[in-house]
Amino acid sequence: MAGKIIADQIEHSTAGSLDTSYVVNGSAKAWAETNAAGTSILGSFGFSSMTDYSTGQQQMFLSNAMTNVFYSRLATGENTAVSWEWTDSATTTSFIHYFNNESTYVDGGVCYGVMGDLA
C-alpha cells in the first residue's frame, strides 16, 4: 500500500523549522562524479547513465525527466585549465557537456549537479 505525508513545514527540535517548499524547490535533483578519463560514473543520484563521445565530450542522462529544458546544470572538475561548454541541445532527460583547454578537448573527472523542477 502506498502512503502519503502532507506537511507544510518540517521542524527540528533545536534547529528551528523550514517550509517544505524549500526542500522541494531548493534541493539538487541529481548529482554525479565521473572518472578522470571521462568514461564512467563513479557515484551518482538521479543520473541513469552517460555516453563518452570522445575526448572531453560527455552526454549525461537523467533518471527522471525535468519539467522543461530550463534547468540549471552545474559542473566542476579536477582540471582547472579547462573551459566549460554546454550545448544548447539539452532535453528534459539529458545534456551534453564539453571541456577544453585552448580549443583542444581534454578529459578530466567532473562533478555534476542539476537543479530545477522534476516533471
Image (cartoon, rainbow, N blue to C red):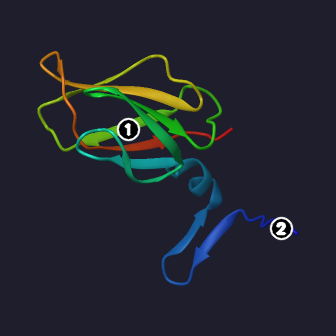
**Which of the image's four quarters has the N terminus?**
bottom right
Residue 72: x %, y % from top left: 46, 34
Mark on residue 98? none
Residue 103: x %, y % from top left: 16, 15
Residue at 11% across / 32% down in the picture? 81
In this view, 14 is above or below 1: below
Horizontal side of residue 90 vs 97, given as left or right: right
Horizontal side of residue 23 vs 15, given as left or right: right
- Give SS at disc 2: loop
Residue underneath mark 2: 3
How many C-alpha atoms fall within 10 Å of the one at disc 2: few (<14), some, or many (≥20)? few
**Three-letter code for the amino acid on which mark 2 is drawn:** Gly
Residue underneath mark 1: 74
Q: Marks 1/2: CA distance? A: 33 Å
Nearest the camera: 24 or 44? 44
Nearest the camera: 64 or 13? 64
How many C-alpha atoms fall within 10 Å of the one at disc 1: few (<14), some, or many (≥20)? few
Nearest the camera: 68 or 38? 38
Residue at 58% across / 57% down in the picture? 23
Horizontal side of residue 110 vs 62, given as left or right: left
Residue at 54% across / 49% down in the picture? 46
**Three-letter code for the amino acid on which mark 1 is drawn:** Leu
Residue 94: x %, y % from top left: 52, 30
